Image: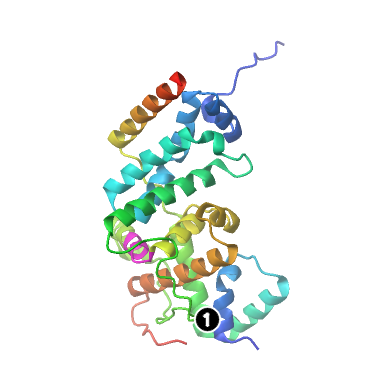
Amino acid sequence: MLTCKDFLHELSDYLDQSLDADIRTKLESHISECPNCWVIADTTRKTIQIYKGMDPYPVPADVQSRLMQALERKIAAKQKE
Amino acid sequence: MKNRPMTAPSLAEADEATLVAQSREGDGRAFGELVRRYESKIFRLAQHVTQNREDAEDVLQETFLKAYEHLDQFQGAAKFYTWIVRIAVNQALMKLRRRRTDRSVSLDEAIDTGEDTIVREVAAWDENPEQRFSRAEFGQILDEAIQGLEPPYRSVFVLRDIDELSTEETADALDLSIPAVKSRLLRARLQLREKLTRHFKRKGDDAFAYL
């Protein structure tokens, strides 16, 4: 029988769906009977989903223009070598 | 009917390997396109690791300058993005070390090797927790939760779950073993779940101790 600790240990792979069918079946049977582990799996899945939807940070125009100027200097210096 | 004239694909459509090859030959425009593709992701990663806006701006610039300088060391087998992530993480950790002169900082810092997995609160969430908050408040809750993670967990979580790199790519970028990436990811996810539960739990549900 799987314990809650065993379940937690496999939680990441379970949520990433990267487990073999036999262990997956065991985990699914555990959460169908253990409300605590069901809640943990559900709220961890939601945590991952929320962060997946985060947008990248736009680079401010002044930071971008400094980056491009520094690169141009670097490229020019390399071409002289 | 005449065939349409063949036109060279625009830089924006060019594949990564072509852009890297052109950049190696000194094509600054090709390298500029690589910068454009990845700058916002590198900027986000730098902000998450350094937790400091000014340092993140420096890291962004240093990462792409170093990448250009050392392009000949890039092995085509890895993705270009994984390679620059590795440069960015190293630059960001150097910034952290400079700021915290009293102790060294590395990706191995504060790793608790104990078996315990942190689960203190178990409570179901609202169906749509974001509806309880303004967009700005919601974003702040997410940012603060990530900032509360130790750097070794934060870097793994950002690469795996926000940037959606594979376990192997994350291990490669951070110079970690695959089991180390997996165990840090699990702990990061559980810690974030714990922090978010404080904000998102369904009203009236009492949290109770677990494990």
Specify the amino acid type for callout 1. Cys
Q: Is residue A57 magenta?
A: no
Across and down, in percent, residue B52 comes to: 28, 52
- Which residue is at a point 51% across and 70% down the rendered structure image? B186
Across and down, in percent, residue B200 comes to: 36, 71
Residue B94 or residue B133, whichever sits in front: B94
Q: Residue furthest top?
A: B2
Q: Is residue A50 left or right of residue A65?
A: right
Counting the numbered discs, the total is: 1
Range of magenta residues: B142-150
Across and down, in percent, residue B152 comes to: 43, 63
Q: Is residue B149 magenta?
A: yes
- Which residue is at a point 50% across and 27% down the rendered structure image? B30
Write down the quadrant of residue B100 in the picture: bottom left
Residue B102 or residue B68, whichever sits in front: B102
Is the magenta region chiefly helix, strand or loop? helix
**Around disc 1, counting alpha carbons within 10 Å, would you say few (fewer than 14), some (14 to 19), or many (20 or more)?**
many
- Which residue is at a point 43% across and 47% down the rendered structure image? B88
Residue B196 or residue B191, whichever sits in front: B191
The answer to whether residue B51 is visible is no
Across and down, in percent, residue A41 comes to: 52, 74
Quadrant location of the N terminus of chain B in the rendered image: top right
Give the letter of the chain under mark 1.
Answer: A
Write down the quadrant of residue B179 in the picture: bottom right
Write down the quadrant of residue B22 in the picture: top right
Q: Is residue B139 left or right of residue A78?
A: left
The answer to whether residue A24 is visible is yes
- Which residue is at a point 58% across and 80% down the rendered structure image? A7
The residue wearing badge 1 is: A37
Is residue B12 shown above or below A34?
above
